[in-house]
Structure formats: C-alpha cells, structure tokens
C-alpha cells in the first residue's frame, strides 16, 4: 500500500515512518526538522503549500494519507496568531481532504481527546458532548468537521495522551519524568486530570492494523483502556522501572498554573476494540519502552 505521512518528523510521525515502512511504500513529509525522515522516501514542504501537496498526490498517488501535521498543543497554539493556527489546523486539513477526495485516497486524521467537555463524566463515548476550551482543541475539532464535509473515505482518531520517548529532536513529558526519576530528582505531577493514556509504540501498531482492516467513515476514540492521571501513570513507571515513588510529588492543575483545566477526558474505547484493535495495559507498554531504553 502507498502511504503518505504528514508531520513525519514529529513525535508520532517518526514512529509511523518506522512501523509503516515495514510493510508499505511510504512517502513522509517534513518541513523544519528532518527527524528520521532522511532514512525514508521523504519530501520537504510546508503543509500549507497546496501546490506542492498537489504535486505529491499526482506523482506519488497515495492510497492512504495519515495526517499528523499540526500546531500540536495548546501551548504552541497560544504562542502563535490565531489565524496562523487556523490555517495550519483547519484550512490545511480541508485542502488535504479535498486532495484525498479527488485522488481516491483515504484520510486518517489524528484529532485529540481534548475536543470533549472535560466536566461531563468519565470514559466518554464518541457521541459525548464536545466543548473544546483551547484554540488548539477547537481547531482540531474544526478539522474533523471539514473532513466530514469533504469526503466519505476518512478515519478520525481522537487521540489520548501519548507517552514514550521522542526520537531525534523530539522530546516528551514522559521522557522528562523518566530522566528526572532515574537521576533521583523529584517530579511534580497533577492528580486532577484524567485521560486514557497509551504509548507511541501502541499508537502506531494500532494505526497500522486499522489501515489494513480498511475502516472508514468513522470517528474512533483512540487510546488505552485505563483512566489515569499523570501522577498515576508515573506511579506505574516507578513500579516497572524500580524508581522511588517518594520522588513523586502530588500537585493540581491550579497549583501547576495550567491555563486550560480539563478535568476528565478519559475515553471509552469499546468501538476501537470492536474492530479487533486491542490496546495493552500501560504497565506492559512501559515495560516495552524501558526494554528499548536499556538495549
């Protein structure tokens, strides 16, 4: 299968390059940072450059497009002008959807669990109330809407908190926690936000499986099966890596100065599992991550 990956030098993009190149012919896009794209068939272009994207579709003729490129967090979005964030997260997504429709390609879009109302209970299903409270989450939801308005052959994945180790220039909060604990330094983690975290390794495995099953015209909660706070996730890390739990310091979103206080966007992943896609437990994911670090 021919697969075009946007944001190929990003945190999840680099893992997608590794995983999908095992079975498929990939073309991976990057712009500023190269990441591991240099090891694969790759193209340097801005996701906002419609003409160059059109050339990619005409020459590479992808069957599947995995769209990960975006202004990828609330913090990053708030550092940019709103129209810039809108153009990257909404307009570029719409243009990509139009190209997919014209060239008969499936569009797999990585959205976010932060589109949900964070005060309406836990283990939310796909039809739960949507109230994004940050510019980032709002534009990701608008991207979802543009895709649904443009084509039928899509798969929207509302992605939970990802953990693992970044590759090359990419770094994650989980990586920071791991390194601090390994060096016997205390870490503050808030206890009052709940999500359904899963690892980068799990995410790319499950994306690969979903592509092969040809799931389409679906919005799917994409995460793990456990409702956890960042503090609880760090407790599991301590258990699996043998770190001292006394180094974990409880804090709250208020104390940590979090601007967008989302209490609970833990997601029900029954629909994901109904397709035979089964996330593993966080403890097993962390074991895998630690084993790769120690090699």
Image (tube, rainbow, N blue to C red):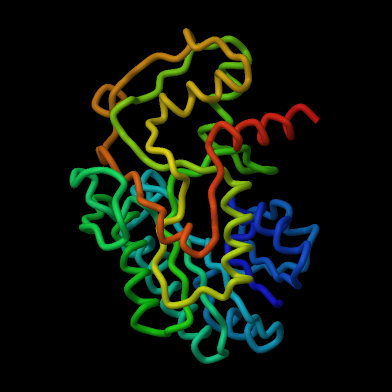
**The image quarter in which residue 125 lies:** bottom left
From the viewer's perspective, is residue 214 above or below residue 190? below
Is 147 positioned to the left or the right of 261 in the image? right
Image location (x, y in percent) of residue 30: 64, 62
Q: Residue furthest bottom?
A: 102
From the viewer's perspective, is residue 244 above or below residue 21? above
Image location (x, y in percent) of residue 252: 28, 24
From the viewer's perspective, is residue 292 above or below residue 69? above
Residue 135 seen from this side: no
**How many tags in the picture?**
0
Kindly identify the residue that appears in the image at 73 percent across and 55 percent down. 18
Image location (x, y in percent) of residue 153: 48, 82
**The image quarter in which residue 85 lies:** bottom left
Toward the viewer: 55 or 204?
Answer: 204
Toward the viewer: 214 or 181?
Answer: 214
Residue 254 seen from this side: yes
Split into 4 quadrants, where in the image is the N terminus? bottom right
Kindly identify the residue that appears in the image at 54 percent across and 61 percent down. 276
Kindly identify the residue that appears in the image at 33 percent across and 50 percent down. 114
Image location (x, y in percent) of residue 110: 47, 61
Toward the viewer: 80 or 91?
Answer: 91
Split into 4 quadrants, where in the image is the C terminus? top right
Kindly identify the residue that appears in the image at 39 percent across and 77 percent down. 147
Is 207 positioned to the left or the right of 254 in the image? right
From the viewer's perspective, is residue 275 above or below residue 58? above
């Amino acid at each position: 299968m021919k697969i075009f990956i946007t944001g190929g030098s990003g945190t999840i993009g680099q893992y997608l390059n590794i995983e999908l190149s095992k079975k498929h012919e990939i073309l991976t896009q990057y712009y500023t940072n190269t990441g591991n794209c240099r090891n694969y068939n790759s193209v340097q272009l801005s996701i906002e450059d419609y003409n160059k994207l059109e050339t990619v579709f005409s020459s590479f003729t992808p069957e599947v497009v995995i769209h990960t490129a975006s202004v990828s967090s609330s913090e990053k979005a708030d550092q940019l002008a709103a129209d810039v964030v809108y153009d990257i997260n909404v307009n570029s997504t719409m243009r990509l959807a139009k190209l997919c429709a014209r060239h008969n390609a499936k569009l797999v879009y990585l959205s976010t669990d932060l589109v949900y109302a964070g005060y309406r209970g836990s283990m939310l299903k796909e039809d739960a109330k949507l109230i994004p409270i940050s510019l980032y989450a709002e534009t990701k939801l608008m991207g979802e809407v543009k895709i649904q308005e443009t084509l039928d052959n899509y798969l929207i994945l509302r992605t939970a908190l990802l953990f693992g180790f970044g590759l090359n220039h990419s770094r994650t909060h989980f990586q920071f926690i791991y390194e601090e604990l390994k060096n016997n330094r205390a870490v503050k983690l808030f206890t009052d936000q709940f999500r359904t975290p899963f690892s980068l390794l799990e995410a790319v495995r499950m994306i690969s499986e979903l592509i092969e099953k040809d799931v389409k015209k679906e919005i799917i909660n994409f995460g793990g099966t456990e409702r956890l706070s960042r503090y609880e996730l760090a407790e599991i890390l301590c258990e699996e890596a043998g770190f001292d739990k006394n180094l974990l310091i409880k804090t709250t979103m208020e104390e940590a100065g979090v601007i967008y206080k989302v209490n609970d966007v833990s997601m029900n992943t029954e629909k994901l599992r109904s397709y035979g896609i089964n996330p593993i437990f966080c403890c097993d994911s962390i074991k895998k991550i630690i084993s790769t670090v120690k090699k």
